[in-house]
Structures are given as structure tokens and as C-alpha cells.
Amino acid sequence: MKKQLPASPMLFPMPALLVGTYGEDGAPNAMTAAWAGACCHVPPCVGVAVRHNRLTFKNIDLKKAFTLNVPPVRLAAEVDYLGIVSGNDEPDKLARVRLDVSPGSKVDAPLIAGCPVNLECRLAQKIVLGSHAWFVGEVVAVHVDEELVDGKGKIDVAALDPLVYCTSTTDYRSLGGRVAGAYDVGNTLKKA
Amino acid sequence: MKKQLPASPMLFPMPALLVGTYGEDGAPNAMTAAWAGACCHVPPCVGVAVRHNRLTFKNIDLKKAFTLNVPPVRLAAEVDYLGIVSGNDEPDKLARVRLDVSPGSKVDAPLIAGCPVNLECRLAQKIVLGSHAWFVGEVVAVHVDEELVDGKGKIDVAALDPLVYCTSTTDYRSLGGRVAGAYDVGNTLKKA
């Protein structure tokens, strides 16, 4: 039997990402975002939901660019801090959590060095939905820690150890073991 | 050192969801989608990317509604099958994988019974991006297996055992253990 819960965007799992932006004065900022996802293959796009009152919202509007950065489990406290505290209230919050940044190669947004995967995104569309806007960015560059990439360009996901966010229980989890190959295990159900 | 990979929407982790729709003739369909995410708090919205040639694309356009369903790890083969095969080519694909559906309570889209979490979504916006459109749905009802919900309305995420999709390695994984509380562990980094 099913039980009804209040309407909310309750998906499992969610990524725990860092959104990197520069402000008017060139100061780097990072905001935690679990409300994000891949949006398009050609052109490659991702989207992220940002609340109107966040500094990130203003910065993306200003620079028409952002980065999405995939943090590892070991940065859980730093990631959480960057979600709790707005850059409006603490402009040096990246320094507090001791995360270094470097400039994007193609867009005016910072790469967060401690994150093994960084996506540079050029703002493609901004969809105002209500409390949040959904910023769609075209991915124009992808940087990955070289020791995580094999000869075929595949990422060692277990070594990446991405931080996972769970809504409802509002906690961070790690990724578990491999279950099966995609575009593969389903073939067992095809017609004989 | 970082290595550059080809531009793609490479986020970790992604959910492995089922998108439920009805066709013109009332036939239920389900498509696997890992490119999805929460978009807005008020009103509660989620989004999902769908390729133009999928039956799901046509069905959402027609009914202005869809469901997002969270499958458990035990349905990995069924989920993968529903991603490999389009409803255009096999209209009875839900029957093949033996997944039952029931009508949504508020929208004209089917709930997939074997999935412990079902979100009913009324189409709010359709953003054409390129190969894919991003369909934003307002969540108007949430159904959860009652044995997974505690007295406070929180979901037992470990028992839910949601299927996780990993891009790059293109495989399914399970969720790992709890790392820390969100809106909590970051407080350890606040000023003394």
C-alpha cells in the first residue's frame, strides 16, 4: 500500500555538487546544489536550480557562466558548509573551508580544485519557476583528475567516490557497489 | 593534474528513474531516464530530459503530464530494458517486464507499482534544447510505499534501495552508507 506525502521534488538519489561563480569584483564563490541534472546531449547541457536570494543567482546573471564541480565524500563537511552559508553573508566562505580555485579555461567561472570533476558551463537558458530559477548551461569543457581516467577516457567511479545527497532524510551518503551494466543487463529480457 | 575529456553532461551520481506516460490510445508507457532533477521548491517542480524520437516525448506533449518513479535496485534489468527499447518499437514493453501500473490520482499518467516512490507531475514548461527537451513538471502528488515511511514522514532510504546510474562507466550502482547529516556537519566549520 502507498501512503501520500506532501508534494515535493522527492527524487533519489541526488548529486551533492558545488556551483562555482565569480562575483562583480572577481571574487570566487561556491554554493552547494543537489537540485541539478543533465539536460541535453547535443549540445551537452546541464541544469541547476538556484534560489533567488543566493549570491550564485546574481553571479550567474552577471557572468552568464558557472561551473558544476563533483566533490568527493571526504569533503562532506566543506560541501555542507557551502550550502548552509550564503556568499552574501560570508564573502570569503571558500577561504574558510580552504578550497582553492582556478579560472575556467573557456568561461568566466572558477574551477574548484578539490573536486575531481569540473564542468565549465556557458549560460544557455534561465527558466524562472518560482522560488528557484533553473539555469541551463552548455558544457564547454570537462576537467577530471588524471589519475581517475583510464586509457579509454572512462572514470574510475569508485575512486572518484562522489558525495550523494538524500532528500527526506537530508543526509549525505556514499555510492555503493556496481549492480549491473547499463544498455546491457536489460538485454536478458529481450525476446528469445 | 587534471585531464580534459570531451564536453558532456558528466555529473555523479544520477538517478535511474522511470518516466510514466499514457499514449493517445490510453496505453501506458515507461521510459528510463537518468537525466532528471529537482528544479524548484515553490511550486515543487522536477525536470526530465527526453529525446525527440521517444514515445514519451509525444505522450507528454499530448497529455501534459508524466510521472517520475524511483525504482529499487532489484529492478535493474527491467529498468535497463525500458531504456533500451522505445515504446515506439514495442508498445507492450511494460507487459514484457511485468510491471503493473495504476492511474495517477491527479494527472493523466500512470504510476508504476513496483517503484516505491511515484511523483505525479503536471507539465509546467517544455524547454527545447537540441537533441533533448527538458520537461518541467509541477509535482502534484507523491506516493510512497507505506512501510518505508516513519512516523515523521521520513523515508527509510536504505530500505528504498534506489537504483543509481553512473555515466562514463555506464553502469548501475546501489547507494552506499550514510556519511553525515546535511545542514549539520558543515556547522563544525563555523566560526568559534
Image: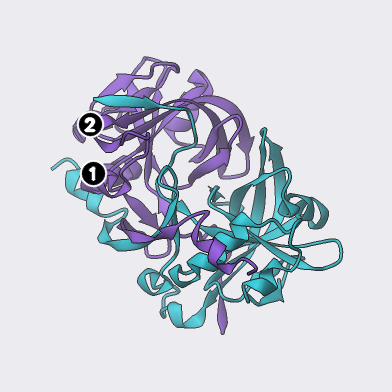
Chain colours: A cyan, B purple
Contact? badges 1 and 2 (CB < 8 Å): yes
Toward the viewer: B47 or A16? A16
Residue at 31%, 55% (x, y): give it: A182
Mark 1 surroundings: few (<14), some (14-19) or many (≥20) residues within 10 A = some
Residue A89 appearing in the image = yes
Residue A72 at what x, y percent from top left? 47, 69
Residue B187 lies in quadrant: bottom right
Q: Residue at x 53, y 38 (%)?
A: B47
The residue closer to the viewer here, B180 or B35, is B180
Q: Are marks 1 and 2 on the same chain?
A: yes
Q: The C terminus of chain A appears in which quarter of the rendering?
A: top left
Residue drawn at 37 percent across, 39 percent down: B154
User: Disc 2 designates what residue?
Assistant: B99
Q: Residues within 10 Å of mark 2 (few under 14, many from 20)?
A: some
Return the mark for residue B75. 1
Left-right relation of B186 to B88: right
Badge number at residue A142: none
Q: Earlier in the sequence, mark 1 or mark 2?
A: 1
Q: Quadrant of residue A93?
A: bottom right
Mark 1: which amino acid? Leu
Badge 2 marks a residue whose secondary structure is loop
Q: Position of residue A42 (x, y in %)?
A: 58, 51
Above or below, B54 against B12 in this view is above
Give amino acid for label 2. Leu
Q: Chain of mark 2?
A: B
